[in-house]
Amino acid sequence: MNHGKILTCLFLLFLCACHNNSADKREDGAELVYEPDGGSAQNPAFSPDGETILFTLFHEGYNEGPAGLYTISDDEPVVLLDEPDCDNVNLPGASWNRVINRITFASDREDTEEIWIIKPDGDGLFRVTNHSGLDTSYTEPSFSPDGQWIVFEVKGQAPEDQQQGSIWKVRADGTGLVQLTDGPGGGTDDRQPNWSPSGNRILFQRRITGSDDWNIYTMDTAGSDIQQVTDAPWSDTDASWSPDGQYIVYSSNYGGIPMPNIFVIPADGGTPRRITFNEENEDAAPSWSPDGRWIAFESHDDENTPASIWRIEVPDSILR
């Protein structure tokens, strides 16, 4: 082969590499983890060793079920639990527990939407909650660090702008059901609780019923000592903890940016720090890797388009 042909081949390889890199990496440094051929991949949560990501695949589009649970550690996802006409949905953050090696999720596989647990290999399926009536859903569960408790959201069947969710907890064996917040009693909508790595605090998002202004709060594990973490007039949602419990990662349109991006804030409040920089996509549902180096999140154009799973490296200034 002559030098001209060699240079041409090298140039074509360079173009191919540039094309692949541009498709799999954004200008803000975020890297594509998984883009489904069909459906919407959402709610990433890391395994305890950080080598695998759990997520929910909504088959009919963004938040449109049926939905199944999948894991991915290489290029191809693995089915954990996927059933016709059922919604099996995990929460980002502490949904995969190291101590008992179980995953918690919400499912309507037996009519009412309940809290369940399952082993990472798909065995050991166990129904944790058993409530009567179809007018209430038990959703958005996360584990305490020791795996003994699950905190979750209880909501009714009201329209979205009239919802008044509450936060509850239950032992992983189904006993000891306790209400922590009372949305209807307080005129609030409380959702998406995540247990802190130290086990002494639970975060959740709250809005006044009918408002679009979500803020992040924390409370102790008895539902007392409620502290507001974010207070700016923007929608702050989908929060979970850093592995050392010093920070909270969440999705927000803080500062009036056109699309929600990923932010980090100290657990006791302060000035938010923006992590992703993408004006065209909504970045949401973030989870921190156990080693503190990565944040996984879902990203999509708008509420009518499916999402993919991405990850971005945590800035060194936060890791120190």
Image (cartoon, rainbow, N blue to C red):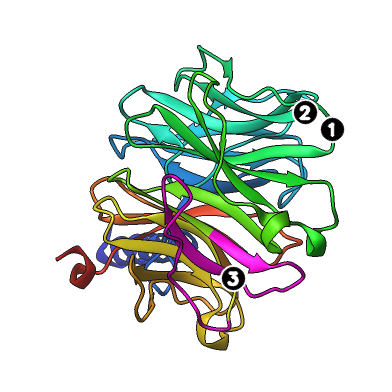
Magenta stretch in the rendered image? 205-233
- Residue at image x 23%, y 68%? 318
Q: Disc 3 or disc 1, which is closer to the eye?
A: 1
| Residue 170 higher or lower than 1, as above or below | above
Residue matched to label 2? 112
Q: Distance between the residues labelled 1 and 2?
A: 6 Å
| Few, some or many residues within 10 Å of mark 2 (<14, 14–19, 20+) | some
Residue 54: x and y in percent read 48, 37
Q: How far apart are marks 3 and 1 (CA)?
A: 35 Å
Pointers 3 and 1 in contact (C-beta within 8 Å) = no
Q: Is residue 224 magenta?
A: yes
- Residue 34 seen by the camera: no
Residue 174: x and y in percent read 55, 21
- Figure quadrant of the C terminus: bottom left
Q: Which of 52 and 182 is in front in this view?
A: 182
Q: Residue furthest bottom?
A: 255
Q: What amino acid is found at the position of numbered circle 2 in the picture? A: Thr
Image check: 87 left or right of 167? right
- Residue at image x 53%, y 23%? 117
Q: Residue 134 carries which label?
A: 1
Residue 65, quarter of picture: top right
Kind of element beneath mark 1: loop
